[in-house]
Image (tube, rainbow, N blue to C red):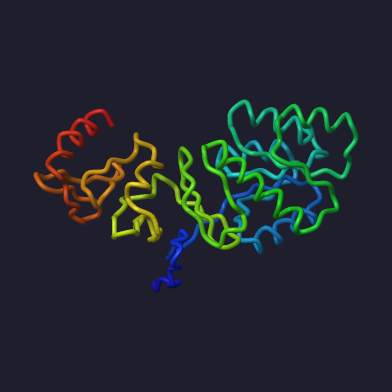
C-alpha cells in the first residue's frame, strides 16, 4: 500500500503519514431513527467512526460492554425504562466515557439532572453540522487537557496525545486513533519518529526522546538509542537484539538487564 507523502515544512510542524487510519469511535443513542441516521451520516462525513446507533438506554449499556466507544452522543428523552440521564448514570458506574447530550427539551429539571453527570457538552435539537463538529472537537480537547496536553483545533497536523490505552493524532480535520496494544515499536530517523503498528505505519516529525517522554512506561521501553519497543510484542531476546514480528531490533548492553527485569515482572 502506497503511503501518501507531504512536504515537510521548515517550521517542523508535526506531520503524519498513514497507511491506514482509525477514527474516533462514537456511539449514538437516539430513539428517533431518522435523526440518528442523519447524525451518523454527518459524523462519517467529518471523519469519525460510528460504532453503533441504538434507540434505547438498555441497548446502549449492552453495546458499550461489547464494543466500547470513545464518545457517546446521548439523547436525553429516550423511550423505554431508562431515559438518557439514567442510562449515563448506570454507564458511569462501570466506565469513564465522555458524554455529549442531545436534547430537544432544555427545561431546568432535565438540565440539573444531566449536569450532575458531568457531560462534556449539550447540543440542542435541531442542530447544525458545525454545532456537532465543535462539540466533538471540544470534547476531545478536554480529554487531551485532562492528560496534560492541549489541542489546537486549527493545526493541520499535530503531535500525538497519549492516553492510557491509545494515541490520538490530529490530521487535518480528523482525530486518528492508534491503540497502544497494536503498536509494535518506534524507530528514530533523525528528527523523525516512525511508529510501526498493526496494519499501519506512521511518521511523526518529532524525536524518539520526545515520544518516549509521552508513552506509558508500563508498556514501552527504550532499548536502543534508535528504538522503543512494546514489551508485550517481544517474541525473543538475544544477546544483542530482540525479535518482534521476525524483525531483529538492536538491544544496547546497558538496556539488556533493564529489559530482562521488566519482562520478569511484565
Residue at 23%, 34% in the rendered image: 263
47 and 224: which is toward the camera: 224
Residue at 47%, 50% in the rendered image: 160
Residue 240 vertical placement versus 46 (above, below): above
Q: Quadrant of residue 217?
A: top left
Residue at 28%, 47% in the rendered image: 228
The quarter of the image holding the C terminus is top left
- Residue 70 appears at what percent x and percent y? 58, 44
Q: Quadrant of residue 46?
A: bottom right
Residue at 67%, 49% in the rendered image: 136
Q: Residue furthest left?
A: 239
Residue 200 visible (yes or no):
no
- Residue 225 appears at what percent x and percent y? 22, 49
Left or right, 70 with reference to 192: right
82 and 201: which is toward the camera: 201
Residue 38 vertical placement versus 266 (above, below): below
Amino acid at each position: 500500500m502506497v503511503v501518501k507523502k507531504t512536504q515537510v515544512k521548515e517550521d517542523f510542524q508535526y506531520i503524519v503519514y498513514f497507511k491506514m487510519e482509525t477514527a474516533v469511535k462514537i456511539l449514538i443513542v437516539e430513539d428517533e431513527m431518522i435523526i440518528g441516521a442523519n447524525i451518523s451520516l454527518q459524523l462519517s462525513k467529518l471523519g469519525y467512526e460510528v460504532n453503533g446507533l441504538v434507540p434505547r438506554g438498555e441497548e446502549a449499556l449492552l453495546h458499550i460492554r461489547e464494543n466500547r466507544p470513545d464518545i457517546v452522543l446521548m439523547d436525553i428523552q429516550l423511550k423505554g425504562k431508562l431515559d438518557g440521564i439514567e442510562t449515563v448514570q448506570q454507564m458511569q458506574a462501570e466506565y469513564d466515557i465522555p458524554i455529549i447530550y442531545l436534547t430537544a427539551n432544555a427545561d431546568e429539571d432535565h438540565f440539573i439532572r444531566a449536569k450532575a453527570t458531568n457531560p462534556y457538552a449539550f447540543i440542542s435539537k435541531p442542530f447544525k453540522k458545525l454545532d456537532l463538529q465543535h462539540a466533538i472537537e471540544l470534547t476531545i480537547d478536554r480529554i487531551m487537557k485532562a492528560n496534560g496536553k492541549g489541542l489546537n483545533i486549527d493545526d493541520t497536523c499535530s503531535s500525538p496525545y497519549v492516553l492510557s490505552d491509545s494515541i490520538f493524532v490530529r490530521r487535518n480535520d480528523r482525530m486518528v486513533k492508534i491503540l497502544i496494544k497494536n503498536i509494535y515499536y518506534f524507530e528514530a530517523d533523525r528528527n523523525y519518529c516512525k511508529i510501526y503498528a498493526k496494519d499501519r505505519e506512521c511518521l511523526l516529525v518529532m524525536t524518539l526522546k520526545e515520544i518516549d517522554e509521552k508513552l506509558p512506561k508500563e508498556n514501552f521501553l527504550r532499548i536502543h538509542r534508535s528504538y522503543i519497543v512494546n514489551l508485550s510484542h517481544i517474541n525473543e531476546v538475544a544477546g544483542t537484539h530482540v525479535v518482534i514480528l521476525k524483525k531483529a531490533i538492536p538491544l544496547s548492553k546497558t538496556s539488556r538487564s533493564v529489559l530482562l527485569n521488566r519482562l520478569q515482572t511484565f
